[in-house]
Image (cartoon, rainbow, N blue to C red):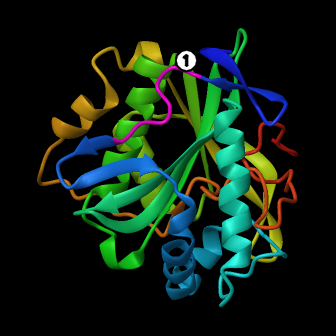
Amino acid sequence: MVGDAERLGGTVVYRRQGWPVTLYEGAVALRPLRLRDAAALRDARSRNAEWLRPWEPTYPEMPLRTTGLTPYVAMLQAIRREARQGLSMPWAITFGGEFVGQLTVGAIVWGSARSAQVGYWIDSAYAGRGITPTAVALAVDHSFFRVGLHRIEANIRPENRASRRVVAKLGFRDEGVRRRQLHIDGAWRDHICYAITAEEVPHGLLRRWRERDPSDPFPESGSDPGSALGPEGPNGTRDPRDPASPHPGPN
Protein backbone atom coordinates (compact mmCIF):
# COMPACT_ATOMS: atom_id res chain seq x y z
CA MET A 1 0.00 0.00 0.00
CA VAL A 2 0.93 3.63 -0.35
CA GLY A 3 1.44 5.57 2.85
CA ASP A 4 2.53 4.96 6.41
CA ALA A 5 1.04 2.39 8.79
CA GLU A 6 -0.35 3.52 12.11
CA ARG A 7 -2.05 1.66 14.94
CA LEU A 8 -5.63 2.53 15.89
CA GLY A 9 -7.37 0.52 18.58
CA GLY A 10 -4.83 -2.29 18.25
CA THR A 11 -5.35 -2.60 14.49
CA VAL A 12 -2.76 -1.56 11.94
CA VAL A 13 -4.32 0.64 9.26
CA TYR A 14 -2.80 2.66 6.43
CA ARG A 15 -2.97 6.37 5.76
CA ARG A 16 -2.06 6.75 2.13
CA GLN A 17 -0.86 9.78 0.30
CA GLY A 18 -3.69 12.03 -0.85
CA TRP A 19 -6.39 11.05 1.64
CA PRO A 20 -8.33 12.61 3.27
CA VAL A 21 -8.57 15.60 0.94
CA THR A 22 -11.10 18.13 -0.33
CA LEU A 23 -11.09 18.95 -4.06
CA TYR A 24 -12.59 22.01 -5.76
CA GLU A 25 -13.58 23.13 -9.25
CA GLY A 26 -15.69 26.29 -9.22
CA ALA A 27 -18.84 25.71 -7.15
CA VAL A 28 -18.33 21.92 -7.21
CA ALA A 29 -16.39 20.26 -4.41
CA LEU A 30 -15.59 16.77 -3.19
CA ARG A 31 -15.00 16.50 0.54
CA PRO A 32 -14.62 13.40 2.72
CA LEU A 33 -17.91 12.06 4.05
CA ARG A 34 -18.51 12.85 7.72
CA LEU A 35 -20.70 11.11 10.28
CA ARG A 36 -22.73 14.28 10.57
CA ASP A 37 -23.69 13.86 6.89
CA ALA A 38 -26.08 11.08 7.95
CA ALA A 39 -29.15 13.33 8.07
CA ALA A 40 -28.42 15.02 4.73
CA LEU A 41 -27.72 11.62 3.16
CA ARG A 42 -30.98 10.17 4.48
CA ASP A 43 -33.04 13.17 3.38
CA ALA A 44 -31.54 13.31 -0.12
CA ARG A 45 -31.91 9.61 -0.79
CA SER A 46 -35.49 9.54 0.55
CA ARG A 47 -36.44 12.56 -1.55
CA ASN A 48 -34.88 10.98 -4.65
CA ALA A 49 -36.09 7.42 -4.11
CA GLU A 50 -37.81 7.06 -7.49
CA TRP A 51 -34.98 8.90 -9.26
CA LEU A 52 -32.39 6.48 -7.83
CA ARG A 53 -34.31 3.20 -7.82
CA PRO A 54 -33.62 2.06 -11.43
CA TRP A 55 -29.84 2.33 -10.93
CA GLU A 56 -29.21 1.40 -7.30
CA PRO A 57 -27.85 -2.02 -6.25
CA THR A 58 -30.33 -3.84 -4.04
CA TYR A 59 -29.84 -3.23 -0.33
CA PRO A 60 -32.59 -5.17 1.48
CA GLU A 61 -31.41 -3.79 4.82
CA MET A 62 -31.73 -0.16 3.69
CA PRO A 63 -34.74 0.89 1.63
CA LEU A 64 -34.41 4.20 -0.20
CA ARG A 65 -37.20 5.52 1.98
CA THR A 66 -36.39 5.28 5.68
CA THR A 67 -36.92 7.70 8.53
CA GLY A 68 -34.22 6.47 10.90
CA LEU A 69 -30.70 7.82 11.07
CA THR A 70 -29.14 4.66 12.52
CA PRO A 71 -28.68 2.81 9.19
CA TYR A 72 -26.93 5.81 7.67
CA VAL A 73 -24.63 6.37 10.63
CA ALA A 74 -23.63 2.69 10.54
CA MET A 75 -23.03 2.87 6.79
CA LEU A 76 -20.87 5.97 7.13
CA GLN A 77 -18.86 4.33 9.90
CA ALA A 78 -18.26 1.31 7.67
CA ILE A 79 -17.12 3.22 4.59
CA ARG A 80 -14.95 5.58 6.64
CA ARG A 81 -13.27 2.51 8.11
CA GLU A 82 -12.61 1.22 4.59
CA ALA A 83 -11.09 4.60 3.74
CA ARG A 84 -8.69 4.41 6.69
CA GLN A 85 -7.60 1.00 5.42
CA GLY A 86 -6.77 2.39 1.98
CA LEU A 87 -9.60 0.54 0.22
CA SER A 88 -11.82 3.46 -0.76
CA MET A 89 -12.15 7.23 -0.97
CA PRO A 90 -15.73 8.21 -0.06
CA TRP A 91 -16.63 11.82 -0.84
CA ALA A 92 -19.69 14.00 -0.44
CA ILE A 93 -20.45 16.02 -3.58
CA THR A 94 -21.28 19.62 -2.71
CA PHE A 95 -22.44 22.49 -4.90
CA GLY A 96 -22.15 25.98 -3.51
CA GLY A 97 -21.47 24.36 -0.15
CA GLU A 98 -24.69 22.30 -0.20
CA PHE A 99 -24.72 18.48 0.01
CA VAL A 100 -26.01 17.26 -3.39
CA GLY A 101 -24.73 13.69 -3.74
CA GLN A 102 -22.01 11.17 -3.16
CA LEU A 103 -19.00 9.78 -5.03
CA THR A 104 -16.80 6.87 -4.00
CA VAL A 105 -13.61 5.58 -5.58
CA GLY A 106 -13.74 2.05 -4.20
CA ALA A 107 -12.67 -1.53 -4.79
CA ILE A 108 -9.09 -0.19 -4.65
CA VAL A 109 -6.53 -2.86 -5.45
CA TRP A 110 -2.86 -2.10 -4.87
CA GLY A 111 0.14 -4.22 -5.86
CA SER A 112 0.65 -4.59 -9.59
CA ALA A 113 -2.98 -3.64 -10.42
CA ARG A 114 -3.42 -0.21 -8.77
CA SER A 115 -7.02 -0.16 -9.94
CA ALA A 116 -10.37 1.03 -8.61
CA GLN A 117 -14.03 1.54 -9.48
CA VAL A 118 -15.99 4.78 -9.31
CA GLY A 119 -19.64 5.06 -8.27
CA TYR A 120 -21.78 8.12 -7.67
CA TRP A 121 -25.27 9.61 -7.41
CA ILE A 122 -26.66 13.13 -7.46
CA ASP A 123 -29.83 14.81 -6.22
CA SER A 124 -32.29 15.20 -9.11
CA ALA A 125 -32.71 18.89 -8.27
CA TYR A 126 -29.07 19.45 -9.28
CA ALA A 127 -28.88 17.24 -12.37
CA GLY A 128 -27.97 18.70 -15.75
CA ARG A 129 -25.55 21.32 -14.41
CA GLY A 130 -22.33 19.43 -15.14
CA ILE A 131 -21.79 18.64 -11.47
CA THR A 132 -21.40 14.87 -11.87
CA PRO A 133 -18.80 14.88 -14.69
CA THR A 134 -16.88 17.62 -12.89
CA ALA A 135 -16.85 15.52 -9.71
CA VAL A 136 -15.76 12.40 -11.63
CA ALA A 137 -12.95 14.33 -13.33
CA LEU A 138 -11.74 15.69 -9.98
CA ALA A 139 -11.78 12.23 -8.40
CA VAL A 140 -10.04 10.49 -11.32
CA ASP A 141 -7.28 13.09 -11.58
CA HIS A 142 -6.65 12.90 -7.83
CA SER A 143 -6.62 9.10 -7.95
CA PHE A 144 -4.11 9.02 -10.80
CA PHE A 145 -1.78 11.91 -10.08
CA ARG A 146 -1.82 12.15 -6.29
CA VAL A 147 -2.77 8.74 -4.91
CA GLY A 148 -0.96 6.70 -7.57
CA LEU A 149 -3.71 4.54 -9.06
CA HIS A 150 -3.38 3.43 -12.67
CA ARG A 151 -6.84 2.28 -13.88
CA ILE A 152 -10.40 3.25 -12.95
CA GLU A 153 -13.60 1.53 -14.08
CA ALA A 154 -17.20 2.70 -14.22
CA ASN A 155 -19.88 0.02 -14.67
CA ILE A 156 -23.20 1.30 -16.04
CA ARG A 157 -26.50 -0.30 -17.00
CA PRO A 158 -27.04 -0.22 -20.80
CA GLU A 159 -30.35 1.57 -20.24
CA ASN A 160 -28.65 4.44 -18.43
CA ARG A 161 -27.83 6.39 -21.59
CA ALA A 162 -27.21 9.66 -19.75
CA SER A 163 -24.48 8.16 -17.59
CA ARG A 164 -22.98 6.30 -20.53
CA ARG A 165 -22.69 9.53 -22.46
CA VAL A 166 -21.03 11.31 -19.53
CA VAL A 167 -18.21 8.77 -19.16
CA ALA A 168 -17.81 8.39 -22.93
CA LYS A 169 -17.38 12.15 -23.31
CA LEU A 170 -14.87 12.14 -20.47
CA GLY A 171 -12.84 9.58 -22.41
CA PHE A 172 -13.65 6.28 -20.69
CA ARG A 173 -13.40 3.32 -23.09
CA ASP A 174 -16.28 0.87 -23.58
CA GLU A 175 -14.79 -2.55 -22.70
CA GLY A 176 -17.92 -4.62 -23.16
CA VAL A 177 -20.84 -6.02 -21.20
CA ARG A 178 -20.62 -7.80 -17.85
CA ARG A 179 -23.60 -10.13 -17.77
CA ARG A 180 -25.93 -9.99 -14.78
CA GLN A 181 -23.31 -8.15 -12.73
CA LEU A 182 -25.49 -6.57 -10.03
CA HIS A 183 -28.93 -7.10 -8.51
CA ILE A 184 -30.80 -3.87 -9.20
CA ASP A 185 -34.48 -2.98 -9.05
CA GLY A 186 -35.64 -6.58 -8.65
CA ALA A 187 -33.38 -8.47 -11.08
CA TRP A 188 -29.78 -9.27 -12.02
CA ARG A 189 -28.76 -6.58 -14.49
CA ASP A 190 -26.11 -6.38 -17.19
CA HIS A 191 -23.58 -3.55 -16.99
CA ILE A 192 -21.25 -2.04 -19.57
CA CYS A 193 -17.70 -1.71 -18.27
CA TYR A 194 -16.06 1.63 -19.07
CA ALA A 195 -12.43 2.19 -18.09
CA ILE A 196 -9.63 4.72 -18.28
CA THR A 197 -5.92 4.59 -17.41
CA ALA A 198 -3.48 7.28 -16.36
CA GLU A 199 -1.61 7.11 -19.69
CA GLU A 200 -4.77 8.11 -21.55
CA VAL A 201 -5.09 11.46 -19.75
CA PRO A 202 -1.52 12.75 -19.29
CA HIS A 203 -2.86 16.30 -18.84
CA GLY A 204 -5.75 15.25 -16.63
CA LEU A 205 -9.43 14.47 -17.06
CA LEU A 206 -10.48 17.82 -15.63
CA ARG A 207 -8.64 19.61 -18.42
CA ARG A 208 -10.47 17.47 -20.99
CA TRP A 209 -13.77 18.39 -19.35
CA ARG A 210 -12.91 22.10 -19.29
CA GLU A 211 -12.00 22.05 -22.98
CA ARG A 212 -15.24 20.39 -24.10
CA ASP A 213 -17.61 22.05 -26.55
CA PRO A 214 -19.79 24.24 -24.28
CA SER A 215 -22.73 23.86 -26.67
CA ASP A 216 -22.80 20.10 -26.06
CA PRO A 217 -24.87 19.50 -22.89
CA PHE A 218 -24.09 16.64 -20.55
CA PRO A 219 -27.24 14.91 -19.29
CA GLU A 220 -26.99 13.35 -15.85
CA SER A 221 -28.90 10.43 -14.42
CA GLY A 222 -29.69 9.89 -10.78
CA SER A 223 -27.31 7.18 -9.71
CA ASP A 224 -24.40 6.48 -11.97
CA PRO A 225 -22.04 3.53 -12.17
CA GLY A 226 -23.04 1.08 -9.50
CA SER A 227 -23.36 2.77 -6.15
CA ALA A 228 -21.42 5.25 -4.05
CA LEU A 229 -22.74 3.78 -0.83
CA GLY A 230 -19.61 1.79 -0.15
CA PRO A 231 -18.71 -1.86 0.37
CA GLU A 232 -21.00 -2.48 3.32
CA GLY A 233 -24.66 -2.00 4.03
CA PRO A 234 -25.84 0.44 6.67
CA ASN A 235 -25.68 -2.20 9.41
CA GLY A 236 -22.07 -3.09 8.66
CA THR A 237 -23.01 -6.11 6.53
CA ARG A 238 -20.97 -6.50 3.39
CA ASP A 239 -22.87 -6.78 0.13
CA PRO A 240 -20.60 -8.65 -2.32
CA ARG A 241 -22.64 -7.34 -5.22
CA ASP A 242 -21.58 -3.74 -4.61
CA PRO A 243 -18.87 -2.59 -7.05
CA ALA A 244 -17.35 -0.51 -4.27
CA SER A 245 -16.39 -3.70 -2.42
CA PRO A 246 -12.70 -4.65 -2.47
CA HIS A 247 -13.85 -8.21 -3.16
CA PRO A 248 -16.88 -7.76 -5.44
CA GLY A 249 -18.97 -10.75 -6.43
CA PRO A 250 -19.91 -11.45 -10.04
CA ASN A 251 -17.67 -8.88 -11.71
* Secondary structure of the residue carrying numbered label 1: loop
- Relative to 161, does residue 86 appear above or below in the rendering? above
Q: Residue at x 65, y 59 (%)?
A: 76
In the depicted view, which residue is nearer to us: 180 or 205?
A: 205
The magenta stretch is: 16-22
User: Does residue 110 show up magenta in the picture?
Assistant: no
Q: Position of residue 12 (x, y in %)?
A: 79, 25
Compared across the picture, whether 71 is left or right of 156 comes to right
Q: Position of residue 150 (x, y in %)?
A: 55, 17
Q: Residue at x 40, y 77 (%)?
A: 124
Few, some or many C-alpha atoms within 10 Å of disc 1 (few <14, some 14-19, many ≥20)?
some
Q: In the rendered view of the protein, which quadrant contains the N terminus?
A: top right
According to the picture, the residue beneath numbered tag 1 turns out to be 150
Q: Quadrant of residue 74?
A: bottom right
Callout 1 amino acid:
His
Q: Main secondary structure of the magenta part?
A: loop
